[in-house]
Image (cartoon, helix red, strand yellow):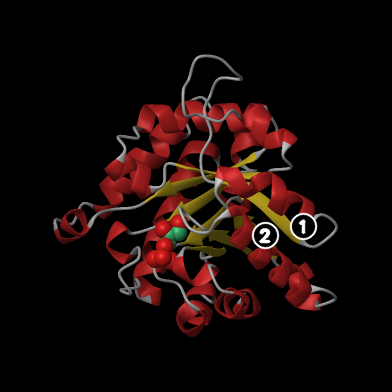
Amino acid sequence: MRKKIIAGNWKMNKTVAESAQLATDLVAAVKGQPYAEAVDIVVCPTFLALDRVSGIIKGSPIKLGAQDAHWENQGAFTGKISVDMLKAAGVTYVILGHSEPRTLFGETDANVNKKTLKVLAEGLIPIVCVGETLAEREGNITEKVVSTQVKAAYQGVSAQDAAKTVIAYEPVWAIGTGRTASDEQAQAVHKFIRGLLSELYGSSVAEAVRIQYGGSMKAENASGLLKQPDVDGGLIGGASLKVDSFLGIIKAA
Ligand code: 13P
């Protein structure tokens, strides 16, 4: 049985003070709740708020995630944050290859691969995001797109490391649009990804990797999606910014 993982990607939202408030409210809400132990809960604030939120969630069941990382330890890389720095701030998970950096900031498959290798080498867990655009879905190339992204991200990743990773399937057309993939659409792609992992690494690795769904997941549609055999959690944007809506998804999981 794979433990479900519900992660809130706060994206470029909330000041440090607002992030601290949300983290404080979440810690209070899940305190002593058995469901909070049954699910892995992750929050991914902005880099600026990581340190503060880390202190707040310490000792709670909530884990810390970052929204990106660079593949070098330090140096002349203006604007970037290293995995070392994230680790020192108490980060466990790192979101990589999200469609927003891919489509808006020129993130490439090759860079996602370097970052994935670095995050794993430092003992953190990458959440590797993949997903097709609407045009790609309508052009019937969803599997081709997702397969290219997965294969590129995992180049050089050992089976032992691959088993620890998380993949987030986020159809680009469902992100922030209110348009969720149907339970069946999500399951079909998740099953495809697991099959691909099986081809690459064998079935025991494929069975170990957790595959999250992301794209307009909310408390109202979460249980249908999370009931699918290959949907092992959610990567949540908008609905993770408020305690009630995020909690609703955690409870559904
Ligand atoms: P929304 O939940 O706002 O659609 O965002 C999904 C997402 O991109 C999470 O990484």
Amino acid bearing label 2? Ala
Q: Residues within 10 Å of mark 1 (few under 14, many from 20)?
A: some
Q: Residues within 10 Å of mark 2 (few under 14, many from 20)?
A: many
Asked which quadrant contains residue 210, the reply is: bottom right
Indicate which disc residue 56 carries.
1
Work out whether 3 lies above or below 86. below
Residue tagged 2: 20
Where is ligand 1, by quadrant?
A: bottom left
| Circle nearer the N terminus (1, 2) | 2
Residue 199 pos. (x, y %): 46, 41
Q: Is residue 23 visible?
A: yes
Indicate which disc residue 145 carries.
none
Classify the position of the C terminus by image quarter: bottom right
Question: Which residue lies at the image location 45% right of the left edge and 68% below the top edge?
Answer: 238
Residue extending farthest bottom: 220
Q: Nearer the viewer, residue 205 or 96?
A: 96
Q: Is residue 2 visible?
A: no
Q: Nearer the viewer, residue 107 or 132?
A: 107
Mark 1, secondary structure of its residue: helix
Mark 2, secondary structure of its residue: helix
Residue 40 pos. (x, y %): 69, 61
Question: Which residue lies at the image location 55% right of the left edge and 42% below the top edge?
Answer: 202
Question: Which residue lies at the image location 60% right of the left edge and 80% below the top edge?
Answer: 244
Amino acid bearing label 1? Ile
Work out whether 102 lies above or below 82. below
Classify the position of the N terminus by image quarter: bottom right
Q: Nearer the viewer, residue 180 or 211?
A: 180
> What separation in Å lies between label 1 and label 2 (alpha carbons)?
7 Å
- Label 1–label 2 contact, CB within 8 A: yes
Query: Horizontally, is 20 left or right of 116 in the view?
Result: right
